[in-house]
Image: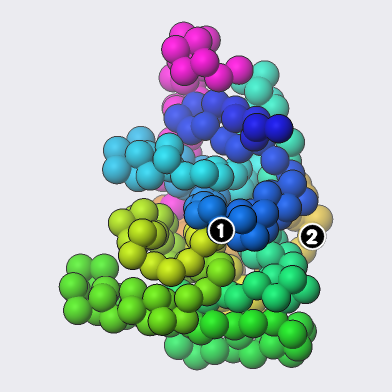
Amino acid sequence: MADERVLVMNAVYTNMNCRELLDATVSHVKTRHQATVIFLNTDVVVKMEKDPYLAKIVEEAEYVIADGMPLIWISKLFHRGLKERVCGSDFVPLLCERAAGEGLSLFFVGGAPDVAAAAVRRLQRQYPKIRIAGFDSPPVGFEKDPKELERLNEHVRQAAPDILIACLGCPKQEKYLYENREKLNSVLYVCAGATIDFMAGKVKRAPAWMRRCGLEWFYRFLREPKRLFRRYFVDDMQVLRLMLRYWGQRRETQQKMGIW
């Protein structure tokens, strides 16, 4: 059965719950068909409006997943209800567990060197059979340095992991994978943001009840108010303006794209 695609504002989402996404992505690895998974939250949705290149990358990704309760609520207002929020930081640990059980190898890109190493050590303790093909912590600005970019790509090629998890932040991770996917010797590519910090234990996740209620962003804000104030209370608030604009365009756009 083909994946259900749902248009909500400026993105077409793959309408899957976490278990369905896990099964589908592992199937890609087993059949050796390349695929990229991108998780969208309101911050990424707003960035897409100002960055046509990022919007193009999202449009061409095999899996576009709603990672944010506001997007789930908006989808219901648009009468195009998405099944559930699938957070990259929840999905990746499950993917690691599944990979350990099925003998699939993983490679992590991103995070500070000590953070990436700590995340790998924790995974190895938790899943003794997990196959970590490697990890790399490229320096800031690596994507603009041809030598550093080629060094990273060669590292990944030599490791030849089944699954590459990029934790570089948006839009750097999306653009890096889009521009280099065909140069790498992997099958499944996952854009995972700050996931490696959570896996290493460097950053604490919000309590489960806050995540269920869509308040994880508020928990993160309370821990880093100076860094996150503008993102959450200025930039991300633009999603309300986008919601009103796309509400008026929704039927015409859905008919044009053949998506319902």
The x, y position of residue 197, in whole percent, is 56, 75
In the image: residue 254, left or right of residue 67: left
Q: Is residue 183 above or below residue 255?
A: below
Q: Secondary structure at mark 2?
A: helix
Mark 2, Cα crowd under 10 Å, few <14 / some 14-19 / many 20+, is few
Residue receiving disc 2: 208
Whether residue 170 is visible to the viewer of this picture, yes or no, is: yes
Mark 1, Cα crowd under 10 Å, few <14 / some 14-19 / many 20+, is few
Q: Is residue 6 above or below residue 235?
A: above
In the image: residue 198, left or right of residue 129: left
> What residue is drawn where x is 44% and y is 52%?
231
> What residue is drawn where x is 58% and y is 75%?
106
Q: Which residues are magenta?
A: 231-260
The x, y position of residue 225, in whole percent, is 51, 63
Task: In the rendered structure, find residue 32 and report the number of the disc placed on it.
Answer: 1
Asked whether residue 242 is drawn in magenta, I would say yes
Name the residue at the front extreme.
31
The x, y position of residue 233, in whole percent, is 48, 47
Q: Is residue 188 above or below residue 66?
A: below
Q: Nearer the viewer, mark 2 or mark 1?
A: 1
Q: Main secondary structure of the magenta part?
A: helix
Q: Secondary structure at mark 1?
A: loop
> What residue is drawn where x is 54% and y is 89%?
117
Whether residue 171 is visible to the viewer of this picture, yes or no, is: no
Earlier in the chain: of badge 2 and badge 1, it is: 1
